[in-house]
Image: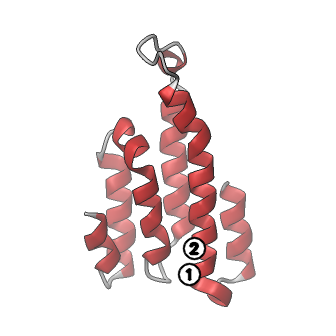
């Protein structure tokens, strides 16, 4: 699905489809595929607001990790979920860095600050 989104030529459709993916798939799926999902962000069209996509995914995972049942999850004996939470920030930060590399000087300074601010 993400390959199709990246190859789409319509920025509005790309933004809409990325938002649909965030909303439709379960949290556990996002944890397992976060790196792949974030890898598509630098490939999106210039008019796509990547900051909104990154922020929405971060909020989705924040809500997931904010669940008290998850904190006291007896099934997570190897602390896999906790490790994923710690590693997810690195993945978001790497996504932003790749976005900067892909866009170069085409990013307005205010967008650079806003994107960094969402981290």
- Residue displayed at 38% across by 51% down: 22
Element at label 1: helix
Which color mode does the image show?
secondary structure
Q: Is residue 7 left or right of residue 30?
A: left
Q: Position of residue 15 (x, y in %)?
A: 40, 69
Does residue 38 sit above or below 101 in this rendering? above
Q: Which residue is mark 2?
A: 99
Residue in the foreground of this view, choosing between 108 and 7: 7
Q: Residue at x 49, y 21 (%)?
A: 78
Q: Image quadrant of residue 18? A: bottom left
Q: Quadrant of the C terminus?
A: bottom right
> Residue 50's spot in the image, x, y percent?
52, 68
Residue found 53% across the figure and 62% down from its top: 52
How many marks overall?
2
State the residue position of label 1: 102
Circle 2: is it few (<14), some (14-19), or many (20+) Cα within 10 Å?
many
Judge whether 76 appears above or below 60 on screen. Answer: above
Indicate the position of residue 51 as horizontal and vertical percent values. 57, 65
Q: In the picture, residue 9 is in which quadrant?
A: bottom left
> Dividing the image into 4 quarters, which one contains the N terminus?
bottom left
Q: Nearer the viewer, residue 115 or 99?
A: 99
Q: Nearer the viewer, residue 36 or 21?
A: 36
SS category of the residue bearing label 2: helix
Q: CA distance from mark 1 to mark 2?
A: 5 Å
Crowd tier of the residue under label 1, counting other residues whose Cα lies within 10 Å: few below 14, some 14–19, many 20 or above: some
Q: Are marks 1 and 2 in contact (CB under 8 Å)?
A: yes
């Amino acid at each position: 699905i993400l390959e199709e989104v990246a190859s789409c030529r319509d920025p509005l459709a790309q933004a809409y489809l990325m938002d649909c993916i965030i909303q439709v798939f379960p949290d556990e799926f996002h944890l397992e595929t976060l790196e792949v999902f974030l890898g598509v962000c630098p490939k999106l069209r210039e008019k796509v607001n990547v900051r909104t996509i990154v922020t929405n995914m971060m909020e989705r995972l924040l809500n997931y990790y904010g669940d008290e049942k998850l904190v006291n999850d007896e099934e997570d004996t190897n602390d896999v979920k906790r490790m994923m939470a710690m590693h997810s920030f690195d993945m978001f930060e790497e996504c932003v860095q790749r976005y900067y590399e892909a866009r170069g000087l085409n990013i307005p300074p205010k967008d650079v600050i806003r994107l960094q601010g969402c981290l």
